[in-house]
Amino acid sequence: MSVASSRPVRTIALSCAAACALSACATVPGAGVAPGSPITQAEAQQGAQYHDQFVAEFGGEVSGPQANYVKDVGQKIAVQSGLATTPDAFDVTLLNSSVNNAFAVPGGYVYVTRQLVTLMNNEAELAGVLGHEVGHVAARHSARRQQAAQRNQLLGVLGQVLSGVLLGDTALGQLGQQISSTAPQLATLSYSRTQELEADGLGVRYLTSAGYDPHAMATVLASLAAQNSLDASLQGRDATVPEWASTHPDPASRVQNALSLAGNGTGITNRDTFLTRIDGLVYGDDPAQGMIEGSTFIHPELRLAFTAPQGFYMLNGTSAVSINGDSGKAQMTSAAYNGNLETYVRQVFQALGGEGSTLAPESVNRTTINGLPALYGTARVTSGSSQVDVAVFAYEFSKSQAFHFTAIAPAGGIGVFNPMFQSMRRISSAEAAQVVPRRLDVVTAARGDTVRTLAARMAYTDAQEQRFRVLNGLASNDQVVPGQKYKIVIRGN
């Protein structure tokens, strides 16, 4: 959650704004254009129109030598698509996001998060991921998604409940997916499995034509699957829903297909060059966006901290922090504040209900939490035979700044969030100064080094060896090789 999150925001489905804006166009650029055809003027205009919004939704743009390297590789692979004849026709952006994601939009705009780059182990894998995304654009998959989105315009989350869109026992689960969708990786609409496989095939083709090892597509998909499994284990959640978001379902199931597509092809990987060029990248959360440390979220610039309930895990988005568990979903964010907490809470409820909604709290109650003036309200929403409770708990940090939780749980179950509501606090300047980011450190294995000795240097107190193996694409029986470069994660500014 960035400092800029103090701007007015829609509380739910915030990160979908850019994708929704794209899908709201009266006409869809790319519709009716033959796959593989050059970028049209309409597509270029659309991409340029929404580029800044996409960058903002994903934490901003990383600059400097690392970003320039990613741009060079991206342009080299993108030109293989035939969408344009010169590399500089493509705008490749390294995003300051702590989630694993990459995407491309019509007009030659290609994006990859720094977190996904840190998971890669060679230049061919970077080219493969970016080639896959360009493949979606070349095949005009985005145009098909936008046409579908026009037929399914999004309402407010609770507006969907009230209109009967979400019914029965699945209502809470679908609400949870919406309320946690502020994680930046959900900012684009999903592709079908057929489209994913088609983009994999195009990515492999581009790798081959650019002189890279085509097997890199399979190895990076394997790393993504391993990372998803590790994250699920650490967070205590179901690993069947991939963290590479709704945009890239189930990378594990596509590994064998990618290997088959690569066949006996050969090419360069540029492993050492890649590792040298990405050395020092921020890994995980950027302190400027706040950091998740175990069950605590701490933001050194906004000077706040809170603790998630036991059994819940958090995802840090650009404009909100999502808190997810089996018994409910919540998020913490901010909105415009004029000094009146009651008005603030009622406006959050109004936004939850969507345009034209009259959703309001059944009551509001004032209190003080760790010295902060606070106010909370609750409401029960019924849809068919299903009921959920909604709570908004807001805190005044200054006369012009407030933050709030929005939480949803089965009727009667909202109390599971009470410890979190009570944990919100202001942090001191000394505590803020102690928040240090994690970074990649590329090291060369010395004689006598093992997976265990290198993993012991990882800046984590848990699962050090598992984290090291996934980060370096090592299987359970793989060992380190003296003289070879490996990635570890350390603390450092």
Image: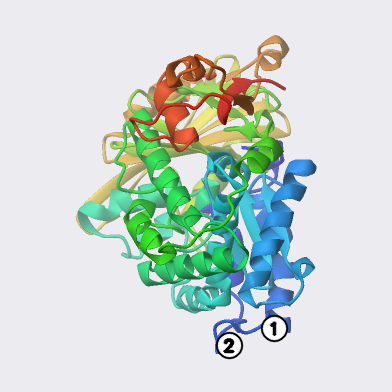
Q: From this viewpoint, is residue 445 visible?
A: yes
Name the spot of residue 252 as percent of width and height, x first: 34, 51
How packed mark 1 is, by other alpha carbons closer than 10 Å (few <14, some 14-19, many 20 or more), is some
How packed mark 2 is, by other alpha carbons closer than 10 Å (few <14, some 14-19, many 20 or more), is some
Say which quadrant the N terminus sits in. top right
Residue for badge 1:
40
Name the spot of residue 208 as percent of width and height, x first: 55, 65
* Left or right of residue 449, residue 373 in this image: right
Instruction: Tell me whether circle 2 and circle 1 mark residues in contact (CB < 8 Å).
Output: yes
Residue for badge 2:
33
Q: Residue at x 66, y 28 (%)?
A: 287
In the displayed structure, would residue 131 be above or below residue 347? below
Distance from disc 2 to disc 1, alpha carbons, whole Å, reads 9 Å
Q: Which SS class for mark 2?
A: loop
Amino acid, disc 1: Thr
Amino acid, disc 2: Val
Say which quadrant the C terminus sits in. top right
In the displayed structure, would residue 21 be above or below residue 436? below
464 or 122: which is nearer to us? 122
Q: From this viewpoint, is residue 337 visible?
A: no
